[in-house]
Amino acid sequence: IKFKKKLRLINLNINNLNHSEMIAKMIIKLSKIFEKKKPNLILLYGDTNSTLAGALTANKHRIPIAHVEGGLRNFDLSIPEDVNRIITDRISNLIFYSTNVAKRNLLSEGYGKFPCKLIKTDDLLSDAVYNNLKFAREKSNILERLKLNHTKLKFILLTIHRDKSLNIKNLPNIFKAINKIAKKNIIIFPAHPNSSKKLKKQKIQLSDNIFIIPPVNYTDMLKLLDECKYVITDSGGLQREAYILKKKSLLILDYTPWEELVKARCAITSSLETKDILKKNKKLYLIRQNFKGKLYGSGNGAKKITSEIVKFMKDNNL
């Protein structure tokens, strides 16, 4: 694709606010940008507050919306991301989904009769992993920086960041289990700033075998994932990246929208209770996973999405 104008990154500089204030300020700023730039189409990804803000603003300006990673549902409206997904899907013109479960969800909600187009593509995470893995293996020095390059001990990669995980009830339960797992394992924990803040505020003590480090870039995260024993996470993205790199995952989630991971025995879900986390962690060691096939594609998602957007714009004279 050849762009008529040079691409430009616009940073809204909105952070450290509650969800409502963040979305409201995003809408105000995006509205001014849309009025000035007059975009032909808004391309949105995932389920963040910025995704929802972009969708609502585009809808009010009558700008077509394309949503990548549509159809995912946790079936829990207390999860902000679930609300963001549902609303964004409902007002989108093009919905790109990557799994049969996502399509099932959309059709069960009536999207087969809505004025939108449902399009299956590879998951963009597969594009990211396959396009960056070789570079990460060759160039990342994260293991050297953590002094793990000279040890034969495999480590567990941990991420915990969701609001539900960080509340005053659940966070102590989660880390009571993680501390016990750490008695026999090294755990590397690239911590989201909010996670670090909540751990400190709740005065949760961590095992000496848990190495909490600042957030790392994508190259370093791929290297850590490539070298780890397995993953403990509440992240939707990391569980799929783990599958692509043939790593099992213990999911600190009552339910995952990526049901296919559980069916393939590549991941196990756990409640946020200490005993259940420890029980499922033990079970994870015993399951015989099935990494055959490519549940999330071969890294061609961007090509299909781009092609469909170009076709949509031509068909609608945009």
Image (cartoon, helix red, strand yellow):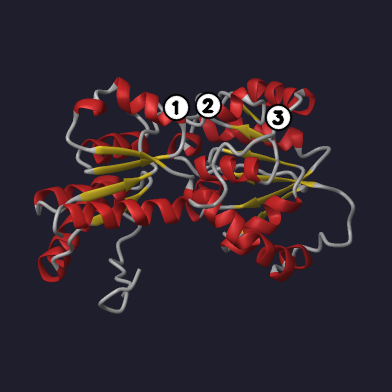
Horizontal and vertical percent for residue 48? Answer: 35, 47
Q: Earlier in the sequence, mark 1 or mark 2?
A: 1
Residue type pointed to by label 1: Val
Q: Are marks 1 and 2 in contact (CB under 8 Å)?
A: yes
Position of 265 relative to 60 (above/below): above
Image quadrant occupied by the N terminus: bottom left
Mark identifier at residue 259: 2
Of residues 35 and 293, the one drawn nearer to the viewer in this rendering:
293
The residue that mark 1 highlights is 101
Answer whether residue 250 is visible to the viewer in this image.
Answer: yes
Answer with the quarter of the image where residue 72 lies: top left
Question: For the point 31% across and 46% down, which residue is it?
Answer: 67
Point out the frontmost of discs 1 and 2: 1
Q: Is residue 223 left or right of residue 262?
A: right
Q: Earlier in the sequence, mark 1 or mark 3?
A: 1
Answer whether residue 21 is visible to the viewer in this image.
Answer: no
Spatial CA distance of label 1 from label 3 is 18 Å
Horizontal and vertical percent for residue 150? Answer: 89, 61
Spatial CA distance of label 1 from label 2 is 7 Å
Question: For the point 52% across and 31% down, which residue is it?
Answer: 170
Mark identifier at residue 290: 3
Of residues 56 and 209, the one drawn nearer to the viewer in this rendering:
56
Point out the frontmost of discs 3 and 2: 3
Secondary structure beneath dot 3 equals loop
Secondary structure beneath dot 1 equals helix
Q: Earlier in the sequence, mark 3 or mark 2?
A: 2
Image quadrant occupied by the C terminus: bottom left
Q: Residues within 10 Å of mark 2 (few under 14, many from 20)?
A: some
Question: For the point 89% across and 56% down, which residue is it?
Answer: 151
